[in-house]
Amino acid sequence: MSESNIATETAESLGFNQTTVLAITGIIIAGIVTRFIIMQIAPSVLKKIIRSDNIKRKTVKDSDKALGSAAGAALSYFLTLQLINSIQSGSGTYSMPEIMQNVLPNIFQFIIALSLVIWAFRLVDVVQDVVEMLDDDGVTDGADKTLISAVESILRFFIIFIGAIFIADAVGFKLTSLIAGLGISGLALALAAKDTISNFFGALTVLLDRPFKVGDWVDVGNSQGEVVEINLRTTLIRTGIDTIITIPNANLVSTPVENYGKRRWRRWQTMVHFDINSDPDKVESFRDDILQSIQENAATMNEDSSWCRVNDISATSVDVSINLYWDVQGGADERAEKEKFLLYVMQIARDHGLEFYDNRIRQQR
């Protein structure tokens, strides 16, 4: 007996005839061919529609396999339904066990749902590119990062939720029974998910009230650091020693938050000590030059409240107090402007022939 005859007899013993086996084989091959065709065609078609290279790469190139699998499984699912309808209509051409009539469509439906979930998950990364494309200034600031983080978290939640429903339906769960069961045990689930629900509403509070945004430096309870991510359940803060603190969003509703990023200005004070033998006229000229530089500096503000004054005189030094307000966006900008200003102070002091007070030098004298 040949191998083909053995295969035919095996299929017939399971309730399939040879025509049905060939039809199922053709359906599977059609799905595989469709998958490869979609993988080849989709990039070229969407290339004409989508202008952004980043969006194009994430929606097609990085997801072409999932997209092709969904399309191939969809075709196989449709053809399988046609085959089953033909069998159930009394056609003698095909034969298939009843259990396979239920299982085979579910297999293709499961592949469709899983592929679409994978593709949708990869599409979440497109949010950042869309926001950057719609942003007028082309710069992703803290508000944009907060929006991106929030939208991505919400999309992932809904993708998982909806995907779980479709996958459950594909594997044969009765959704009506599942929903009824959820209604019966809803109270227990609500109690079990109390913290999750609190964190979710905490995230909504953060997004609506905007006590801070991604990139702000904040104090939350005993934690201090830069906000790096705002999710549906937690907010991540990177500390000054480069560790990550995970704060449940529910805590943010009841905990005072000190946001350094919302400061209108950054006050800075320093003291310059000159030798007691310094010429008073030169000290006065130094004072005027420094005050003028503060008023003309584009990185300062509140010029009327800024000052440069002789603050004190001791037996060894003349102390000049400097007070100004930086108008900068972050700590890095402040440090850079402070460095330039201090170097300028050194240069002005040198130009006026002033020597900074050093107790060691006076002792040598």
Image (cartoon, helix red, strand yellow):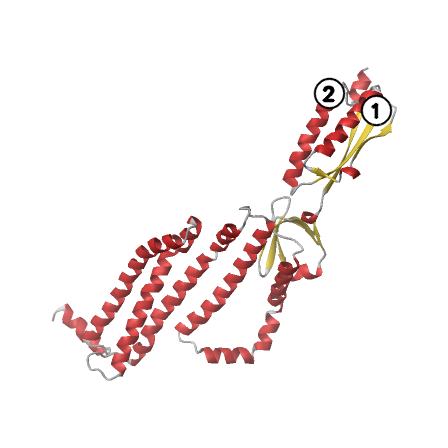
- The residue to which callout 1 is attached is 317
Question: Which type of secondary structure does the marked residue at label 2 adopt?
Answer: helix
Query: In the shown orientation, is residue 236 left or right of residue 35?
Result: right
Residue 87 pos. (x, y %): 25, 80
In depth, the one of 255 and 296 nearer the eye is: 296
Residue 196 pos. (x, y %): 60, 66
Question: Which type of secondary structure does the marked residue at label 1 adopt?
Answer: strand
Query: Could you tell me how far apart the alpha carbons at marks 2 and 1 are, in whole angstroms?
Result: 17 Å
What amino acid is at disc 2? Arg
Residue 295 pos. (x, y %): 74, 34
Dividing the picture into quadrants, the one containing residue 340 is top right
Q: Is residue 317 above or below residue 234?
A: above
In depth, the one of 24 and 136 nearer the eye is: 136
- The residue to which callout 2 is attached is 350
Mark in front: 2 vs 1: 2
Query: In the shown orientation, is residue 362 left or right of residue 198?
Result: right
What amino acid is at disc 1? Ser
